[in-house]
Amino acid sequence: MNPDRIFILTGAGVSAESGLSTFRDKGGLWSQYRIEDVASIEGYERNPAKVLEFYNLRRRIHRDVQPNAAHVALGRLQREWGARGGEVTICTQNIDSLHELGGAQRVIHMHGELGKARCHDCGDVTPADGELSLSLGCAACGRVGGLRPHVVWFGETPLELDEIYDKLAAADLFVSIGTSGNVYPAAGFVAAARREGAVTMEINLEPSENAHLFDLARYGKASEAAPAWVSELIATV
Ligand code: APR
């Protein structure tokens, strides 16, 4: 197989071996917190301090983690494939920056980024390495207390969808890595890729909700299965 354009969708499973919790595995984040309390606009408006603290805790945890072999392999594939005239789109549902730390040059963060803040009033997005609090003001509009994580919550529209669907329509190969296939629109990307004629492959610890929609599958740890796949693919050309 020598696909020119590869679309890779990643989920929390690609960062699990870096030490970041997934959401729906045993002991995952959604077994510790209620989504409606910490990952919805209603929860934020009800108790913004609680939501800011949830993401501040995740930001503190994120400071100590490193990209794993899966992130590094995908960064290598994006660079080497691009150098050969191909294109690798990395679209992640994750809000961590481990793809970039693993060498990826362009990453679509469809659910936003932990390292950025957005003003609830004017929408201005700025880097946010430090912790967010209600005492901070927006540099653009001056509103104090309205800085929220630049993260897409349930009920909100994911980011960069126009570019995502353009890249999906053009893809020869669609690869899903480390996602349970529970949350739309991301869970619908494999069907969209199939409709456009792409070959589809899943790399995951276990079959996802959408396993039946994939032509190919490799089950195992992302830090092992993803590098093996990338090495085989690069060796074929
Ligand atoms: N290697 C490969 N896959 C793994 C590993 C691993 N080491 N560990 C876990 N997995 C798999 C699990 O089997 C599961 O299918 O990763 C998947 C993680 O699924 P979820 O916890 O549901 O995470 P994700 O699919 O990314 O969730 C999507 O839901 O709550 C929202 O915004 C949140 O972006 C998130 C979205």
Image (cartoon, grey):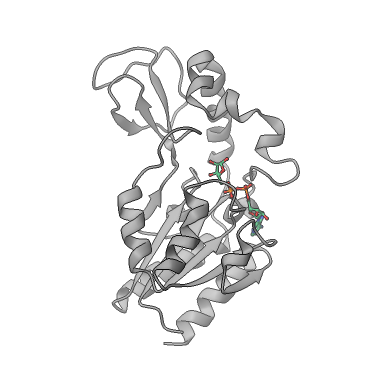
Q: How many circles with numbers are drawn on the protein?
A: 0
Image position, residue 213 (x, y; %)? 57, 66
Residue pictured at 46% horizontal, 87% vertical: 236
> Is residue 227 positioned above or below 53 on the image?
below
In the rendered image, residue 227, in percent from the top left (x then y), is placed at 56, 71
- State the image coordinates of residue 24 (x, y, percent, origin top left): 67, 44
In the image, residue 18 sits, relative to residue 201, either above or below, namely: above
Q: Residue at x 46, y 55 (%)?
A: 99
Hey, which residue is sitting farthest front in the picture?
Answer: 195
Q: Is residue 147 visible?
A: yes
Residue furthest out toward the bottom: 236
Q: Is residue 84 above or below residue 152?
A: below
Which residue is more in the foreground, 189 or 125? 189
Observer-nearest of 121 and 234: 121
Location of the C terminus (image quadrant): bottom left
Q: Is residue 10 left or right of residue 84?
A: right
Locate residue 227 relative to residue 185 in the image: left or right: right
Residue 106: in sight, yes or no? Answer: no
Name the spot of residue 87 as percent of width and height, x first: 33, 70
The residue at the far right in this view is 26
Query: Which residue is pictured at 31% across the width and 75% down the height?
Result: 83
At 49% from the left edge and 62% from the top edge, which residue is drawn? Answer: 190
